[in-house]
Amino acid sequence: MIVTRRGYTIAAAVAVALAGVIVAVALRSSDPDRPAASPTATASPTGSPIPVIMPGRPGESASTVPSDQVKAPDGSRYNTLDTWFVRMMIPHHQQALEMAALAPTRAKHPQIRAIADRITAAQGPEVRFFRTWLQQRGLGEKSDEGGHDHGAMKGMQPPEAIRGLAGLTGDAFDKMFVDMMAAHHEGAITMCTDVLRVGVDQRIQELATGIAAEQQAEINRLREIPL
């Protein structure tokens, strides 16, 4: 089922909620009584090093480093929610990339194609970062209990909706793309706010803040397209 558009009221509410979470994270980062996280384990990626684009902090440029040099800092901490977030965001981003890849040949409005290009440019490197994060901690993309629980990933679109989107062009594609991508982004923002509340890995905190801010901005841009 495709989630219908909910307008600026919901977008504004999400933005306000995100701002509150960011303030809460800033306050708790200085709490000396915060419980310790699970100990980390490092592991070197297998195979030859590949270039990995490391997303910068909000407002900063990305940097490229060999994958075998992307290591957790000594003494870094992470917990089960950090790991859950990273594992879930890989397929979540992959679905956004799948939808974005449809836009160049199907979208009518240039704004749709521009937003799809931004999604591809941002989320492809983030997927590579997430995979490297797992590799450096000796973790797989799936938990020991089994595969990804798509029901736990907010905003994920059902396969039949993706197939339906792929069969459209022009205005019909644009309207469906806006509804689906906005709902998908809203789900990602929810996942980011969850890890901001409970996660402990500093790099994940920074990345989740940047993802949530960027995807809220993209929701606003999607809603401004005259359809």
Image: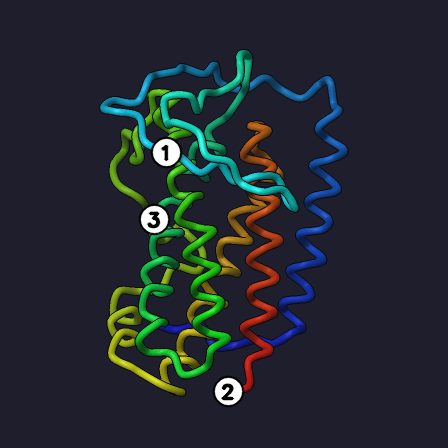
Q: Residue at x 53, y 12 (%)?
A: 74
Classify mark 3: helix, strand or loop. Answer: helix
Report crowding for label 3: few under 14, some 14 to 19, many 20 or more residues within 10 A (C-alpha): some
Report crowding for label 1: few under 14, some 14 to 19, many 20 or more residues within 10 A (C-alpha): few
Q: Residue at x 40, y 51 (%)?
A: 93
Q: Residue at x 38, y 29 (%)?
A: 134
Kindly identify which residue carries mark 1.
Answer: 51
Q: Position of residue 46 (x, y in %)?
A: 25, 22
Residue depth check, mark 2 versus mark 3: number of the one nearer the observer: 2
Of pointers 2 and 3, the one earlier in the residue sequence: 3
Q: Position of residue 122 (x, y in %)?
A: 47, 51
Q: Eyeballing the image, is 128 above or below 10?
A: above
Kindly identify which residue carries mark 2.
Answer: 227
Classify mark 2: helix, strand or loop. Answer: loop
Between 22 and 36, the one nearer to me in the picture: 22
Of pointers 1 and 2, the one earlier in the residue sequence: 1
Q: Amino acid at mark 2?
A: Leu
Q: Residue at x 69, y 36 (%)?
A: 25
Q: Position of residue 68 (x, y in %)?
A: 36, 21
Q: Amino acid at mark 3?
A: Pro
Q: CA distance from mark 2 to mark 3?
A: 29 Å
Kindly identify which residue carries mark 3.
Answer: 91
Quadrant of res 65: top left
Q: What colour scheme was applied to this rendering of the protein?
A: rainbow
Q: CA distance from mark 3 to mark 1?
A: 21 Å
Of pointers 3 and 1, the one earlier in the residue sequence: 1
Between 35 and 15, the one nearer to me in the picture: 15
